[in-house]
Amino acid sequence: MKKIIKSLLLFAAMPIFAQQGGMWVPSLLKGMNESEMKSLGMKMSVSDIYDVNKSSMKDAVPQFNGGCTSEVISPKGLLLTNHHCGYGQIQSHSTVENDYLTHGFWAKSLEEELPNEDLYVTFIVSIHDVTTDVLKDTESLTEEATKKAKIQSNINDLQKSFAREEWQSVMIRTFFEGNQYMLFVTETFEDVRLVGTPPSSIGKFGSDTDNWVWPRHTGDFMLFRIYADKNNRPAKYSADNVPYAPKHYFPISLSGVEQDDFTMVFGYPGRTQEYLPSYAIEQILNDLNPAKIEIRDKALKATDAYMRADHAIKIQYASKYASTANYWKKWIGESQGLQKSNALEVKRAFEKDFTDRVIANKKEKEYGHLLAEFKVLYEQIAPFALARDYFQEIVLRNNELLSIGFRLYQLENAYAKGGEQSFVERRTQLLNQLKGLYKDYNKNVDKDVFEQLITLYGTKAPKELTPSNIHNVNYADLTYEIYAKTALTSFEGVEKMLSGTGGDAISKLNKDTGYMIAKLLAKNYFEKIAPNYDELQLKIGALQREYMKAQLELFPEARIFPDANSTLRVTYGKVNGYNPSDAVSYNYVTYLEGVMEKYVPGDYEFDVPEKLIELYNNKDFGEYADVNGKLPVNFIGTNHTTGGNSGSPVFDAHGNLIGLNFDRVWEGTMSDIYYDPAICRNIMVDARYILFVIDKYAGAKHLIDEMKIVYPKGKGKK
Ligand code: ARG
Ligand code: GLU
């Protein structure tokens, strides 16, 4: 008996048993989720959230540009998302003379709205469980690679045959690590125009210092508009397109939030790994995160020095820098959070319990081998996983000479395989991409970054898995040699090298110092690292599928949700502060006062625009102030979110929009691996701050007039 109680107590500490957390599939909320949501205060029914037969909330929540989330907030297709989600678009419309990053931008009419090449939003039309079809004729296949291939071919068949309208697409994703498959019918709109953005001193206030941090004071929002053809269907950009008339759009409430209020977040969380064995977490904690953090740390410091000294470089590198800094900081918080919450101990205790349940249920034959095999496989994969992260971070991500060199290496391979014709096709594509890339390229920045990173690669990555040419050399000399001679540091240089026949181009390439080093590292990766990693990962994936199946079977009482996979999910919780450490407690809301407390005139992170100071001094908050007369800026809650939830709408109990998700708190960033309801919080912009900035700061009242505002009881439109 004692043992049972002890194990129950342990479960209470497990993420999957906590009464909060989880990212749920919107079409499957009936039952457990609905009753939890109602007990937390929700006043809607789950068919208001997702319904295939009538318009429902899901019809107003498109994925934004494949990564973030956005929501429709007017009958004319006005779209709200985060400033950091549309940052690249603002940057590409910005120049030193017309710097929208610094000053903001507000279209005064439809005609002034700015089109964006390559930007798209994708709506979910319907969700279907297709597990039986996808797993058809795979049960008997024992070889993992064969099984995977058969599954893929079933997916391809379904993708072709599933009924849809001609402008719709079909996408299939796995849930529960291969135990369930869902099909999504989608509609993608490609004419999405920039409508308005606050200056970075509001939209990115606090920048990287405040990123992932509570208390927070960022107005991280901006507005786009979806355009459709005359039949309200998706269409490529055309001057003739008209504002999209949505099936549904969200009313915005001015009532604000109080402690313990119900909140719900709807969006596209990218990736979580809540069901990893302890061995995997150990590896992340001890090997992978520290290596990746160190690499980015060096790259960021080198870049930052140039950005501070030169405004043109600052604009060129703004977007890249922010995105590199983002996960750098997240991994630091994640590692600390895993440590602080004893995630490893909790996992190990769970594994002990798992083993007990396997035995109690007489399932040793099916599941008894899983944990022991995980242990062996994670030991085997360790050096390959580390070498792979070094390669990805250094060659593919953080040094441009190497990442351009890598793409040229793919071009050489295309030539070797497909001859002149595929060379020519690929060259055209590549030159197109590179043109954009070199617009934001600076040789000196890149060279400094290279020297830092090649040093790490040569000295810290597993020696047996990296080429000996980069061991024990003078890295400054090596860098000098390469950058003095390579033609890869300008678009014209690459263009010239690629001119002529495929044969000519390849032979010129192979004499280029920049290309040679990139090729050396790429070849090494494909020969020594990738094949071993992939083979082991295939085995781990198969085990993980069985492990997931076992957990679903042996813990029927558990709240097990599928890991995030960039599909539409619902998460819910309540407004709540937290205690990050002994004697420290954080309130759930911040006010404009806090912006002024952080204000550092002229600072690149904490400057405040004059107009905002003026509004603050005059307490000119219009109808957007809280009952206490203060202007709310951000608030936090227990909603379980992750990357991809940026720009997600936040709702009150009635389905009115009350905020915009944009971040998580530092102490809780380990929630991708282990959700601890005590310290995991998501950070949201208060809807009233958004409306205040649009109306009072920007004077864009015409946009507010498009929206449906819900006034607190007793107050109304004046
Ligand atoms: N941490 C948030 C998210 O993961 C915001 C990132 C953008 N802001 C920044 N300062 N880099 O994406
Ligand atoms: N800022 C993140 C994003 O871009 C959301 C924050 C998080 O990871 O929770 O999706």
Image (cartoon, rainbow, N blue to C red):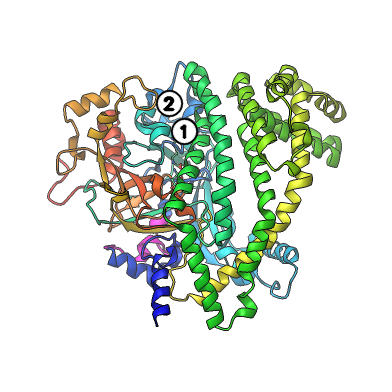
- Residue 51: within the magenta? yes
Q: Residue at x 64, y 72 (%)?
A: 369
Q: Residues within 10 Å of mark 1 (few under 14, many from 20)?
A: some
Q: CA distance from mark 1 to mark 2?
A: 8 Å
Q: Residue at x 48, y 75 (%)?
A: 555
Q: Tag on residue 101? A: 2
Q: Residue at x 65, y 38 (%)?
A: 460
Q: Is residue 663 above or below residue 493?
A: below
Q: Position of residue 13 (x, y in %)?
A: 40, 65
Q: Quadrant of the C terminus?
A: top left
Give SS at disc 1. Answer: helix
Disc 1 + disc 2, Cβ < 8 Å: yes
Q: Using the image as rendered, state which of residue 139 and residue 693 is in the foreground.
A: 139
Question: The disc labelled 2 sits on which kind of residue?
Answer: Leu
Which quadrant of the structure image shows residue 706? top left
Left or right of 418: which side holds 217? left
Mark 1 CB in 8 Å range of ligand 1?
yes
Q: Residues within 10 Å of mark 2 (few under 14, many from 20)?
A: many
Q: Using the image as rendered, state which of residue 109 and residue 550 is in the foreground.
A: 550
Q: Quadrant of the N terminus?
A: bottom left
Q: Position of residue 398 (x, y in %)?
A: 61, 33
Q: Residue at x 48, y 53 (%)?
A: 672
Q: Position of residue 157 (x, y in %)?
A: 68, 63
Q: Position of residue 554 (x, y in %)?
A: 51, 76
Give SS at disc 2. Answer: helix
Question: The disc labelled 1 sits on which kind of residue?
Answer: Tyr
Ligand 2 found in image quarter: top left
Residue span colored magenta: 41-58
Which quadrant of the structure image shows residue 603? top left
Q: Is residue 482 above or below residue 151?
A: above
Q: Which residue is mark 1?
A: 87
